[in-house]
Image (cartoon, rainbow, N blue to C red):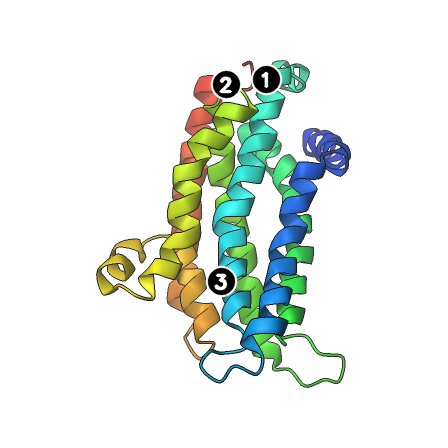
Amino acid sequence: MRSVKAVFKKQAKDMLKNTSVLITFVIFPIVAFVMTEFVARGNYDMPDTMFVTMMAGIFIGMGLIQSACGIIAEDREKKSLRFLVMAGVKPMSYLIGIGGVIIIAALVTSLAFAFIGGLISFDGGFVPHELAAFMAVMMSGAVASIILGAVIGIFSKNQQSALGLSLPFALVLGFGPLLAQFNERIESLIGIFYTQQINVVMNDFSTGLAQPLLVIWLNIAVLAVVFAFAYGKKGLKG
C-alpha cells in the first residue's frame, strides 16, 4: 500500500506539470461540445449525442492509451522509479499507482461528456440509469486502455517510440467502432474489443450491460496478465 501511495503521489505531481498529457483530457470534450452545439443540435438528420458518443469513444480508445504509454515510457527513459523496482514494487502496485491518477482525470472528463450529452442536468431532467450505464462503460474502458498503454510503454525505449508503437492500437481501438457503424464485417471483427462494447451501450442505452461489461472485463483480465508478464520481463530499468 505504501508503494501504491508513493507512485500515486509521484505521478500526480508529474501529470500536473505535463501540459501535453493534460490537454488530452480537455481537448476531446471541447471538440464534442463545439460539434454538438454547432452541428448536431437543430440538425434533424443526426442525433444530438452523435459527437459526444464519437469523441468519448476516441478519448477512451486513443487518448488514454497514448497518455498511459507515454507516462510509462518516460519513467523507463528517466529511470525515475528505479528505486521502487529495486525495493520490490509489484507490477500491480505500480499499475494501480499510475492508473489511479489517470482514472481520476478520466472520471472528470467522462462527467464532462455526460454533461454535454445531456445525461447530467441541473434541472433534474435526466435518467439516472443512463448516466450510470455511461459511466460504467467509460470507466471500465478507461481501465482497459490504461493497462494496454502501460504494456506498450514498458516495451518502449523512450516517449517517442512509445507514441509510435501505440498509434496502430489507438487507431484501431479509437476509430474501429466508428467504422463499424458503416460496415458489418468490421463490426463483427471488432466486437471482441472493449471499445466496440462502449460504442454499443452509448448508442443504445436500452442495451443490457451484462454482455458489454463482460467483454470489457475479459479484455481487462487478458491485458492485466500481459502487463504482469511485460513488467516481469522488462521492468522499468530502461
Kind of residue at badge 3: Met
Q: Nearer the viewer, residue 208 or 14?
A: 14
Quadrant housing the N terminus: top right
Real-space Cα separation, disc 3 to disc 1, in angstroms: 34 Å
In percent of width and height, residue 76 lies at 58, 19
Nearest to N terminus: mark 3 or mark 1: 3
Real-space Cα separation, disc 1 to disc 2, in angstroms: 6 Å
Q: Secondary structure at mark 2?
A: loop
In percent of width and height, residue 96 lies at 61, 38
What residue is shown with label 1?
A: 77
For marks 3 and 1, give the one nearer the viewer. 3
In percent of width and height, residue 47 lies at 49, 78
Q: Is residue 209 visible?
A: no
Q: On screen, 23 above or below 119?
A: above
- CB under 8 Å between discs 1 and 2: yes
Kind of residue at badge 2: Lys
Q: Which mark is residue 157?
A: 2
Q: Which mark is residue 54?
A: 3
